[in-house]
Image (cartoon, rainbow, N blue to C red):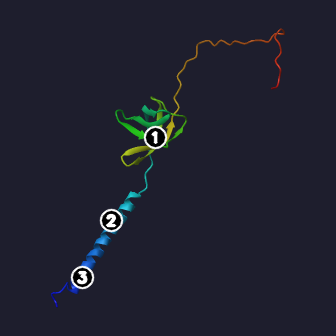
Amino acid sequence: MFLQGRPPFFQQIANMKKTVIFGILMSALCLLSVSSCREKQLLNVRGEVKSVEIHKDTLIALTLSLNNGGDSLVFNLDNARFQNGVMLPKDSVIVDYIEHHDTLKALVVTVLPKVNNFSLPDTLVTISRKATDNEPSRPKGK
């Protein structure tokens, strides 16, 4: 009789193995779900636009040359917002972005205004026109 089937002790160990394996799997699943939900950190960088990738009328990507010299970053522009217009090459911009998997996803791109360099001539000529009595009068209003 003793040799028929497993003794109750071995059945309890087999049931415990299933419970322990199930507990380990659930712990691993909880750990993975908590670690993947970490808060994404908003970063920003300032630089000069090297190039803008455009497909038809949609901005796809932005290559930004950093102010430190040789480094450059490529940003994904899906669902990005633009302040002060859309950037062109050689514009200075500030990009607020997050790291999404292995890509940099731009959220807000702020175009910095350029300083206009112009010079005025030494003498300004003012041209004025005086109305004469011979000119037909313009109707006022509308």
Are the residues tagged 1 and 2 within 8 Å (C-beta)? no
- The percent position of residue 140, horizontal first and vertical second, equals 83, 22
- The percent position of residue 78, horizontal first and vertical second, equals 47, 42
Count of marks overlaid on the render: 3
Q: Which mark is residue 28?
A: 2
Q: Mark 1: which secondary structure? A: loop
Label 3 – label 2 distance at C-alpha: 26 Å
Amino acid tagged 1: Leu
Q: Is residue 14 above or below residue 77?
A: below
Write down the residue under mark 3.
11
Q: Which mark is residue 77?
A: 1
Horizontal side of residue 135 vs 35, given as left or right: right
Q: Residue placed farthest to the bottom in the image?
A: 1
- Residue drawn at point x = 51 percent, y = 29 percent: 114
Horizontal side of residue 85 vs 75, given as left or right: right
Q: Mark 2: which secondary structure? A: helix
Q: Is residue 33 above or below residue 116?
A: below
- Residue drawn at point x = 68 percent, y = 13 percent: 126
Q: Which mark is residue 29?
A: none
Amino acid tagged 2: Ala
Q: Which of the marked residues, 1 or 3, is nearer the chain's N terminus?
A: 3
